[in-house]
Image (cartoon, rainbow, N blue to C red):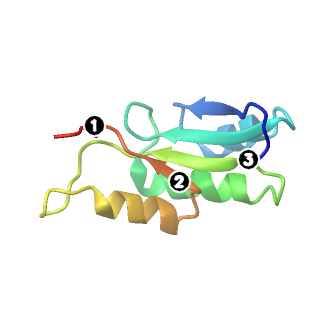
Amino acid sequence: KASKPAFGVWLTVPGPWIARTAALASPHLSWLAIDCEHGLTPLQPGAAETIAAVASLGSNAPSVLVRIPATGACADGSATWQIKYVLDAGARGAIVPMVGAN
């Protein structure tokens, strides 16, 4: 809501400890993105553990976003379960790759 840049951290290395350390690196961080597509953090259970670690920092913690992998679709061809999984785990948003307008 503020009219200023939002600074964040893009995590490609797994681990709740690394995520907490990154989140505490600066009081000016607005977001922290966990890359489960090209990063080393697995969607299950890695994303949920990392989200919980950052959330445990309290109300001043940066918002967590998760980039879901482009694979692992449901029988109907969607990645809906991945989006639901990260949102149910407490992420503030999902970054969805490979979206195209057809």
Q: Name the amino acid, label 1.
A: Met
Image: 88 above or below 62? below
Q: Which residue is mark 3?
A: 62
Q: Name the amino acid, label 3.
A: Pro
Specify which label sits upstream in the sequence, 2 or 3: 3
Residue at x-position 53% and y-position 65%? 89
Image: 45 above or below 29? below
* Disc 2 from disc 1: Cα separation: 16 Å
Label 1: how many residues lie within 10 Å, few (<14), some (14-19) or many (20+)?
A: few
Q: Name the amino acid, label 2.
A: Gly
Residue at x-position 39% and y-position 58%? 83
Q: Which residue is mark 2?
A: 93
Specify which label sits upstream in the sequence, 3 or 1: 3
Indicate the quadrant containing the C terminus: top left, top right, bottom left or bottom right: top left
Specify which label sits upstream in the sequence, 2 or 1: 2
In this rendering, the label closer to the viewer, 3 or 1: 1
Image: 99 above or below 53? above
Q: Tell me the quarter of the picture where residue 45 sits.
A: bottom left
Q: Which residue is mark 1?
A: 98
45 relative to 20 in the view: left or right: left
Label 3: how many residues lie within 10 Å, few (<14), some (14-19) or many (20+)?
A: many
Q: Position of residue 41 (x, y in %)?
A: 46, 41
Image: 84 above or below 101? below
Q: Tell me the quarter of the picture where residue 11 sits.
A: top right
Residue at x-position 68% and y-position 33%? 8
* Disc 2 from disc 3: Cα separation: 12 Å
The foreground one among 90 and 52 is 90
89 relative to 85 in the view: left or right: right
SS at badge 2: strand
Q: Position of residue 93 (x, y in %)?
A: 53, 53
* Disc 3 from disc 1: Cα separation: 26 Å
